[in-house]
Image (spheres, rainbow, N blue to C red):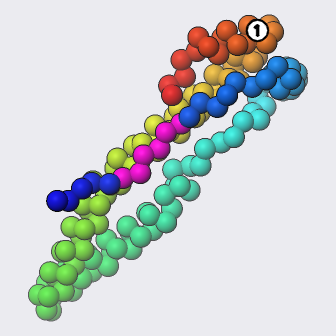
């Protein structure tokens, strides 16, 4: 029996920064509010560059085979049609769930670090910061 497989991405909340890191970041953010020391997730196109290339090349070749087959031999049309079904099916049953999972991961990642930075700036001390982070909703 056929199964649908796709990659699932999940953002795992890192441990809360310690008081020394908090104090250092508090000072840096006081001097430069736009400073962002936290890691960035890869962009969608960076993450799926190879997959997108393969898909575009495969669909292009399959489409050309269908067009060539309709003009000459029917066997090219059949091969091209099978190729198109494979690429379109892969996009629907694997590519879309993987893409949506990755976009959810990116959103949770950005939301967490945006909240972390905002709470560092907003808090008066480390204890206040811990309270803000424990009560924050960031989408993860």
Q: Is residue 19 visible?
A: yes
Q: Look at 67% across and 28% down and name the residue there.
A: 15
Q: Residue at x 24, y 74 (%)?
A: 83
Residue closer to the observer: 17 or 109 = 17
- Residue 18 vs residue 83: left or right? right
What residue span does the magenta drawing correspond to? 6-11
Horizontal placement of 46 versus 64: left or right? right
Q: Is residue 48 above or below residue 118?
A: below
The magenta stretch spans residue 61: no
Q: Could you say where residue 43 lies in the image, as x and y percent from the top left?
A: 56, 49
Dot 1: few (<14), some (14–19), or many (≥20) neighbours within 10 Å? few
Left or right, residue 43 beside residue 63: right
Q: Nearer the viewer, residue 122 or 4?
A: 4
Task: Specify whether residue 25 is in view.
Answer: no
Q: Is residue 9 magenta?
A: yes
Provide the secondary structure element on which disc 1 rests: helix
Furthest residue toward bottom: 72
Report the quarter where the N terminus lies.
bottom left
Query: Which of the 4 quarters of the picture holds residue 16?
Result: top right
Instruction: Identify residue for label 1.
Output: 127
Res 38 quadrant in image: top right
Position of 22 relative to 4 (above/below): above
Q: Main secondary structure of the magenta part?
A: loop
User: Where residue 104 sits in the image (x, y, percent)?
Assistant: 46, 37
């Amino acid at each position: 029996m056929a199964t649908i497989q796709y990659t699932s991405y999940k953002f795992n909340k890192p441990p809360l920064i310690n008081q020394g890191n908090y104090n250092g970041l508090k000072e840096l953010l006081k001097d430069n509010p736009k400073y962002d020391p936290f890691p960035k997730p890869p962009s969608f196109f960076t993450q799926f560059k190879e997959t997108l290339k393969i898909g575009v090349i495969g669909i292009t070749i399959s489409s050309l085979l269908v067009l060539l087959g309709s003009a000459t031999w029917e066997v090219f049309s059949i091969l091209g049609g099978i190729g198109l079904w494979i690429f379109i099916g892969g996009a629907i049953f694997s590519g879309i769930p993987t893409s949506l999972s990755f976009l959810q991961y990116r959103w949770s990642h950005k939301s967490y670090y945006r909240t972390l930075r905002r709470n560092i700036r907003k808090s008066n001390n480390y204890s206040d910061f811990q309270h803000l982070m424990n009560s924050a909703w960031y989408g993860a």
